[in-house]
Image (cartoon, rainbow, N blue to C red):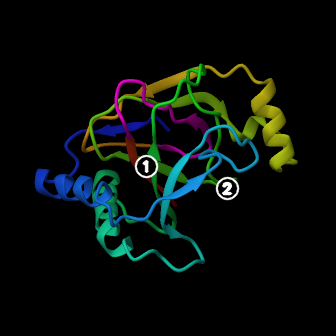
Amino acid sequence: MTPIIVDNLLPAGYADDIERDLTQTGFDWFYVKDVTNANYGNNSGFVHPAYDYGKSPSTWFPYIKPFTYSIEQTLDRKIEELYRIRVGFLYPSPNINQFNTPHVDFLWPHLTACYYVSNTDGDTVIFDQHLSEVGSDINNESLKLYTEKTKFTIKTSVNPVKNRLIIFDGLNFHASTKPKHHDTRLVITVNFK
């Protein structure tokens, strides 16, 4: 699947409301040692799990979920199954890495959509490498080994512009990048079928 990029996804007022909601002091953030995969441990940041399949949604879910209808409109089809909506907050880092650890969010077929809440830097990088290349015995150990040994090649890199959406095959390895010139990088990531 070729990544789909849509600018000005939402009406400007709704995009402004989302940005204001996520940056107010009442929004709940949770520190995680690694925003990509708990087994890597070197890409720290903050997350807000608005929806995680099989668990109770957060109190913010009713305010964030309507944005998923714009994803359906972009794809011209309904979301069959929603797996996760997670808000991510990355902060500047002197990390010398070009991007965070390449990863996939789930081990089964799905699509991933990233919505950029504000203008910032810290591209989303999508690689040519696909989960199917890891082999048939996929587990946390084989994934970690694969990411350590693979020389990833970049398929596309998307700059986070406020109100921009990118949709891509979730089984393509991808990575976030910490901002270098802004205080925050806020992204809503939706995983779905």
Q: Nearer the viewer, residue 97 or 69?
A: 97
- 5 drawn magenta: no
Q: Position of residue 4 (x, y in %)?
A: 37, 39
- 169 drawn magenta: yes
What residue is pinned by disc 2? Answer: 108
What residue is pinned by disc 1? Answer: 113
Magenta stretch secondary structure, dominant: loop
Looking at the image, which residue sits at the far bottom?
56
Mark 2: which secondary structure? loop
Q: Position of residue 155 (x, y in %)?
A: 52, 24
Q: Nearer the viewer, residue 45 or 125?
A: 45
Residue 142's quadrant in the figure?
Answer: top right
Q: Position of residue 139 (x, y in %)?
A: 83, 50
On screen, residue 66 versus residue 78, left or right, reads left
Q: Amino acid at mark 2?
A: Trp
Q: Nearer the viewer, residue 25 or 190?
A: 25
Label 2 crowd bin: few (<14), some (14–19), many (20+), radius 10 Å: few
Label 1 crowd bin: few (<14), some (14–19), many (20+), radius 10 Å: many
Q: Amino acid at mark 1?
A: Ala
On screen, residue 97 versus residue 113, left or right, reads right
Extent of the magenta region? 168-184
